[in-house]
Amino acid sequence: MDSHGQDGQRVVWTVVETDIGPLMLAATANGLVNVVFHATDAVCERALERLAARFGGAPVADPDAPPLAEAIRQLRAYFAGERQDFELPLDWSLISGFNRQVLRELACGVPYGSVVGYGDLAGRVGQPGGAQAVGAAMGANPLPVVVPCHRVVESDGGIGGFGGGLETKRKLLALEGVLPEPLF
């Protein structure tokens, strides 16, 4: 990497329609690196600018690139209720330190159809009392849905926050059988 944190990796991207709206997917040679909610043209443009700055080159639209094609296939199966786990290589380079530690624990330790409290997740990574820091890690998750930050809830039973919006979080939890389907 150079002094700007750039490594010149090629980034490919596409937008896929899902039950929760359009998602922008981006991948490097190392794996899926970014999932972005509400992928309108403006949202994609901002995300692509961030990726270009981070990786040192303009991302290339290529929905047929193998890592994207496989991610699309698995996301479609997930939303169809045919897949509970994602088996994708992930590029964790957009997140580091405590946030990466928390998200890796979330990805491996909170299975489909279950939830965990912010404080409980903090305890799992050796930071009891770190519920707010876990909340910040969820907000910084570059790989939502695939790294299931929607499964993290408040200890009092509240749904908690969500970068994709609370309605999106409710839909994902309903898909996994944690909540009833929204009425409207």
Image (cartoon, helix red, strand yellow):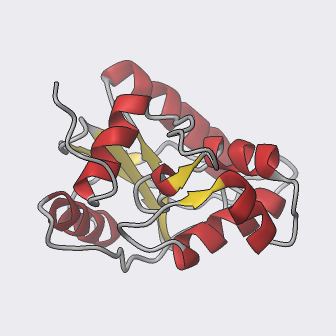
Camera sees residue 61: no
How many numbered circles does the render carry? 0
For the point 22% across and 35% down, the residue is: 182
Residue 74: % across, % down: 24, 69
Q: Is residue 69 above or below residue 132?
A: below
For the point 34% across and 30% down, the residue is: 167
Residue 181: % across, % down: 19, 42
Task: Name the side, left or right, on which 47 lies relative to 69.
Answer: right
Quadrant in the rendering for residue 122: bottom right
Q: Is residue 57 above or below residue 65?
A: above
Q: Is residue 161 above or below residue 62?
A: above
Residue 78: % across, % down: 22, 64
Residue 66: % across, % down: 28, 72
Residue situated in front as seen by the camera: 38 or 105 = 105
For the point 74% across and 68% down, the residue is: 101
Q: Residue farthest to the top?
A: 42
Q: Quadrant of the C terminus?
A: top left
Camera sees residue 147: yes
